[in-house]
Amino acid sequence: MKIRTIIPLFAFSLLSQGEEARDDLMSFTNGDQLHGRLAGIAAGPSVIWKRADVTGEVKYSASDLRRIVLRGGRPARSLETLSHIGTANGDRIPGVVREMDDKRVVLDTVFGGIIEFPREQVGLLAPNPLGGRTLYHGPYDPQEWVMLNAEHPDGIPASKDEEKKGKNPALWKHTGTAWYWQNKEVGTALVRKNGMPDRAMLRFDIAWKSRLSCTVAFHADFKKPAKQAEGGAGARDRAGMAARLMNSTSLPDLFGESYALQIYSNYVMLHRTGFDEEGRPRLDRVQTANSSLRLGDSGTATVEIRCNRLTGEILLFINGEFVVQWSEIADANENTGGYAGKGDGFGFVVQAEDTPVRISEVLVAEWNGMPDAARSLQVDDADIVLLANGTDRFSGKVVGLKGGKLKLEGRYGDFEFPLNEVAEVRFAKSRLAEAPDPASDEIKTRLYPLGRISGRPLSGDGERLRILNGSAGEIDVNLDYAAMLDFRGTESFLDDWDVEF
């Protein structure tokens, strides 16, 4: 059986030959952290840990651990494809589906070999989920990000420099694989100044307490107008700028020429940010027919922005569901200034006092122009097949996959689709079984740049981890492809919000 596999060229950083390997970082439930190296998993379960300054190995109970970030979050080897399946317990397992019938799904993985899952436990097939390269996934390394505010538009200096001036700016804090904002005041943006292509997909998980009020800027250039920079007629009092940061007009000062999406608990607003010819900040709302949301006062959500500077399309998805689309003028139109986002950076800023926010699972990828997701059409009694061209979709019953062909029995005929032409398949909810109850000592192995597989740890030597998955049984996971081991046995985001993180 020969199946064509699409292998994207990933642009994220991997450990290259000759590069010094980073230490692993172990975080405890009480907030303590310890650098060293994962040496294995023993019965208990317990973690075997090594450090250069300690003779011998040390064991720690897995129940006392929060997570282990491996090699600073950088995998030793790259996944060959972003193709994956989604299971009933929320796992996203990367690999290529080789066969499927009404009983089983056979997945070929680089990290664990051939893995067989019960058909009723698989709710998603994603042979070509993004259509382009993955450019960033994190945040694993805080040094890849910059914090800036009104006083420091180019980046907040090291804390020691600020202490000499008697200033203590409010900062985002990084722990594990997330950024946290828990300050009562506002004003500090968290940004990456590059990484977004012309056709980009920006996805991230956000968690919040109190009512949500967070702005995400994209295609930002972070530039200031020439008159303002030179102190001319457009120059303004930067000392008073911080006091205006709850006002949306401060967004151009933080992000320059960009789009700024303001996300609240019950609605969203999109603005163009920039400066006029005199260097004064400009903020123009992009109108749309519908901008309502239904998010609680506290909760979590997955936000996905798809934007195309070349055509002007901007789409917003929340938790996989389509919310709204804006149609801007393409950047090629010189008469109107074109698409407002002139750069390739993005960032976040909280705009309401005493509103804790957590940003995690940040993913930037090239967007293939696909305007919809199969989840938007998921129903109880039919399977949905969305093709990679972004427009064609079919409903019916998927009866199998073999020889690289997906077979669908539809209302108006039977179809066969080459797997490399399928973007996603969402299976009918009524045919899915409930996820098995997780074991009390279950851990989640997070793969890079995409994927997660859960299971009870059985054994390991630091390079491989043997787990007992509730659906597929025992699996040997090659940790070269992993970025983190998560030991928390709960999905409640509140458990990660202790004072010391």
Image (tube, rainbow, N blue to C red):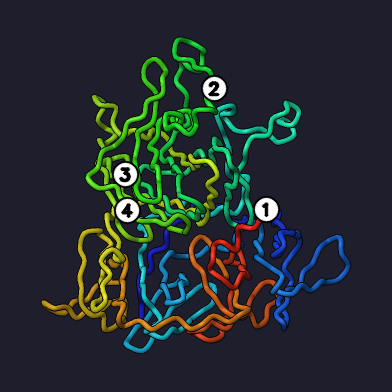
Question: Identity of the amino acid at label 1?
Answer: Glu
Label 3 Cα crowd, 10 Å radius (few <14 / some 14-19 / many 20+):
many
SS under mark 2: helix
Q: Position of residue 250 (x, y in %)?
A: 46, 29
What residue would you read off at disc 2?
A: 240
- The answer to whether residue 18 is visible is no
What residue would you read off at disc 3?
A: 308
Nearer-the-camera pick, 333 or 13: 333
What residue would you read off at disc 4?
A: 368
Q: Which mark is residue 245?
A: none
| Mark 4 vs 1: CB contact within 8 A | no
Instruction: Describe residue 62's horizontal placement relative to residue 249 as left or right.
Output: right
Nearer-the-camera pick, 464 or 58: 58
Mark 2 or mark 3: which is in front?
2
Q: Report the quarter where the N terminus lies.
A: bottom left
Q: Position of residue 461 (x, y in %)?
A: 70, 76
Give the CA distance from mark 2 to mark 4: 43 Å
Give the CA distance from mark 3 to mark 4: 9 Å
Decide which of tag 4 and tag 1 comes sooner along the chain: 1
**Residue situated furthest left in the rendering:** 412
Question: Identity of the amino acid at label 3?
Answer: Asn
**Residue situated furthest bottom in the rendering:** 103
Label 4 Cα crowd, 10 Å radius (few <14 / some 14-19 / many 20+):
some
